[in-house]
Image: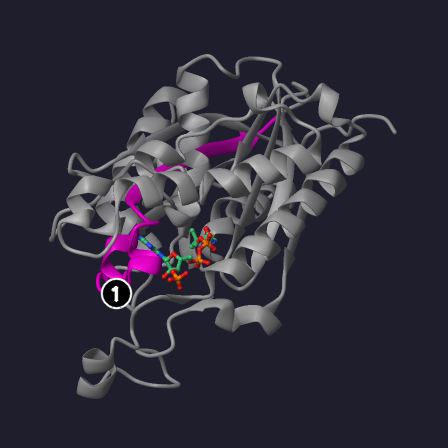
Amino acid sequence: MKNPTPIVEIAATGRFLPDNVVTNDDLAKTMDTSDEWIRTRTGISERRIAPDGLTAAEMGASAARQAMERAGVQPGEVDIVILSTATPDRWLPSTACDTQALLGCDNAVAFDIMAACSGFLYGLSMAEGYLAAGRGEIALVISAEKMSTIIDWDDRTTAVLFGDGAGAAVVRRSNGSGRGILSTHLRSDGRLANLLYRPGGGTIDPLSQGVLDEGRHLMKMQGREIFKNAVRNMAEACDLALQKAGLTSDDIDLLVPHQANIRIIEATAKYAGIPMEKVYVNVDRYGNMSSASVPIAFDEALEQGRIGPGSKVLTAAFGAGLTWGAMTLRM
Ligand code: COA
């Protein structure tokens, strides 16, 4: 199969990470865990935790400003702001609108998407569709996550896994350059929603003193089931995205996977036939930042020269929903 001609490309990326570093040893002071357990089971050594008062919109705007500056794009030129988050600042309005206001993207349509850890890939795909339909020239895809606000800090099985941060990409039409998104495979399975969810605080179980007292507004997870589904679905998505692009794993210069757990990353890479030297990993430094993990990893890989003009990249993500997917790109 011939390589498809990309319709949109990532013009530039940016990231924001809160300064506050929380190590495994820090966590072991307040919960029954250890650096050794966390490192061997997850690969995580530390994560960033945002201070009270720093919003997801502000983190997202910082990442987006960096991406826009690098792309040479002015706020008024942005046609659409797509923001993915599992931790909106408020239930109404969208965090995207708050971010748009902070950025001064006055000519843009702005809205949130909720696809948990797969949000950046879903967002890129939506931006691609919007631009391909001729509705605009420039999209901002932002992922901003303040996971520390929905973690149950008394639950050691989830609290050690997550961190805060934001990543962003300026997406524009590729105008025949050959750079851009080559293929996409996205899926969801709502039948497995209860493997990773927040039972209370929404319309099913509105916020009440009881919800707060029992912590039903906080994240609950069945870790082992999530682990199995993550590996199976990401591996299959990688295969299908490669097939759609007419590529094989040998063609890929770098795999940029969602950063949930080093064991999930290693298993996915193995199934996809990609050696670990060609896999970008930062889960050790940041933990799982939900949808912000992929764009932050992407941004670091670009900055470090692990990918550059002409590189072929495979990216894959998995999260609550369940949601998952993979994408191939030529940079
Ligand atoms: N510190 C110390 N011990 C812990 C612990 C912690 N932070 N968390 C769990 N344990 C204990 C458990 O209580 C259990 O003890 P027990 O045997 O006495 O009952 C033991 O460690 C093993 O727990 P288990 O859940 O079987 O461990 P695991 O090897 O499956 O690893 C996860 C747990 C969460 C690391 C792993 O299942 C995982 O990464 N799942 C995917 C999670 C994820 O990525 N979610 C986001 C997806 S986007």
**Displayed quadrant of residue 40:** top left
Kind of residue sitting beneath label 1: Arg
With 157 as the anchor, is 59 left or right in this view? left
On the question of residue 61 being in view, the answer is yes
Front residue of 104/5: it is 5
User: In the displayed structure, would residue 171 be above or below residue 93?
Assistant: above
- Distance from mark 1 CB to nearest ligand 1 atom below 8 Å: no
Q: Name the residue under label 1.
A: 90
Quadrant where ligand 1 appears: bottom left
State the quadrant of the N terminus: top right
- Which residue appears at 37% of the width and 37% of the height? 167
Q: Residues within 10 Å of mark 1 (few under 14, many from 20)?
A: few
Q: Position of residue 51 (x, y in %)?
A: 13, 47
Q: In this view, does 251 lie above or below 129?
A: above
Give coordinates of residue 181: x percent, y percent: 64, 32
**Residue in the picture at 22% in, 64% down:** 154
The vertical placement of 215 against 81, above or below, is below
Visual colour scheme: one colour
For this orientation, the residue located farthest to the right is 1
Range covered by the magenta-colored residues? 146-174
Relative image position of residue 138 (x, y in whole percent): 48, 35
Q: Position of residue 250 (x, y in %)?
A: 73, 20
Which image quarter holds the C terminus? top right
Tell which of 61 and 72 is nearer to you. 61
Q: How many marks?
A: 1
Q: Which of 261 and 2 is in front in this view?
A: 261
